[in-house]
Amino acid sequence: MTQYRGLDKPKGRGFFLFWKSMFVAAMLALVAFFWVASSSVEYIWRWNRVPQYFWVNEAADVRSEAEGDVTIIDRQGNEQRIVVRDASGEEHPHMLPGEGKVLVSQGDFAYRGDTLGRYELNRPGILLEGLWITLEVSVLAIIGGIVIGVVTGLCRISINPMLRWGAITYIEIIRGSPLLVQIFLWYFVVGTLINALLEHVGFGGISPLWYGVMALALFTGAYVAEIVRAGIQSVHRGQMEAARSLGMSYAQAMRKVILPQAFRRIMPPLAGQFISLIKDSSLLGVIAIRELTKATREVVTTSLQPFELWIVCAVLYLVLTFTLSLFVQYLERRAIR
């Protein structure tokens, strides 16, 4: 079997078999290197303790909030109720899930803090919660970045000086300052002012997550705008002239003729920008958003397992970015067809 590429000499099956074998050998050598390096480090690997940070399955106690007699033990729907009556006659109800086990009997005397019942607690662990927040923030920022980037990119090539200069100013300011500084500005400056104004008129403050999303969306939108501008300008001018000669307005020609062609060309750089966005979301930990990196850092602090947990963190980011890359490749193939 031979394969041709341009004017190169045809390559036989042996050529590809040899280099595929070299790739496999290089990967095996890399794995062997890390295996030997990790074995030589004086460190106790405890991979068996990692799953507990993904899903928590532990016993939870329902403790008495008062000192008194247990007067009522009954079932209300899917829950069990345990009522403790203190010396003044006030009743203190305690709710226990239906599958839980009651550890006291009616008429028993309970001290404050005594265990009245016990049940199994099943909930997502800190790493799974951090992964979900990272995914949520990334999706919202990608959507916002696309909207901001497309609008700004169109303004960037507009003949209207106000729109063009405004787009250029926004792009240069955002691209010329670090993302970490922008996150600080959004949270500590803009966020403080907005929350103070909302509290003044009687509304609650906005969660730090939304300031983080806005910072990421605006940062990504500046780069998407330049990608969109370059994609539109890469389409031959004759396409617009032909569309206008057929009676289309500028907006119709842009939407039906220019943007579909530009979209196919800008998908690879857009994918790279969105992958960078997912990794940049790790900076949101500085404003108390417990995304994946901050969650991992907290677990490392309490568990003293830096190697296992940071490796798991890297693998989870790789899963997110690789999945996005595959999705963009699928869209690119659909666009080509």
Image: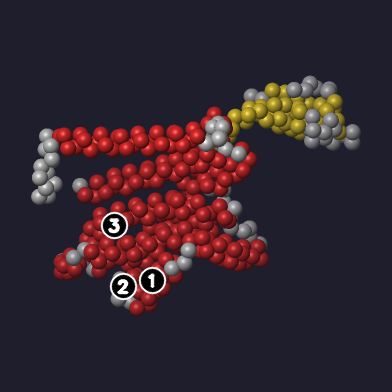
Mark sitting earlier along the chain (2/3): 2
What crowding class fits label 2: few (fewer than 14 Cα within 10 Å), some (14-19), or many (20 or more)? some
Callout 2–callout 1 Cβ contact below 8 Å: yes
Q: Nearer the viewer, residue 4 or 256?
A: 4
Separation of disc 2 and disc 3 at Cα?
19 Å
Q: Are marks 2 and 3 in contact (CB under 8 Å)?
A: no
* Side of 245 where 87 appears, left or right: right
- Name the residue: 49% across, 39% down: 312
Counting the numbered discs, the total is 3
Tell me the tag on residue 167. 1
Question: Considering the numbered disc 1 on the image, is that residue within a helix, a strand or a loop?
Answer: helix
Disc number lying in front (2 or 3): 3
Q: Earlier in the sequence, mark 2 or mark 1?
A: 2
Distance from label 2 to label 1 (Cα)? 10 Å
Farthest residue in the bottom direction? Answer: 161
Question: Residue 118 in the image: x percent, y percent?
Answer: 70, 26
Residue at image location 52% in from the left, 39% down from the top? 307
Split into 4 quadrants, where in the image is the N terminus?
A: top left
- Across and down, in percent, residue 130 comes to 53, 44
Label 1 environment density (alpha carbons within 10 Å; few <14, some 14–19, many ≥20): many
Q: Given this view, does label 2 or label 1 mark the residue nearer the observer?
A: 1
Crowdedness near tag 3: few (<14), some (14–19) or many (≥20) residues, C-alpha within 10 Å: some
Could you tell me which residue is drawn at 51 percent across and 42 percent down? 310
**What's the residue type where badge 2 is placed?**
Ser
Which label belongs to residue 158?
A: 2
Which label sits on residue 93?
A: none
Q: CA distance from mark 1 to mark 3?
A: 19 Å
What's the amino acid at mark 1?
A: Ala
The residue carrying mark 3 is 266
Is 152 placed left or right of 306 in the picture? left
Question: Disc 3 marks which amino acid?
Answer: Ile
Residue 303 against residue 238 in the figure, above or below: above
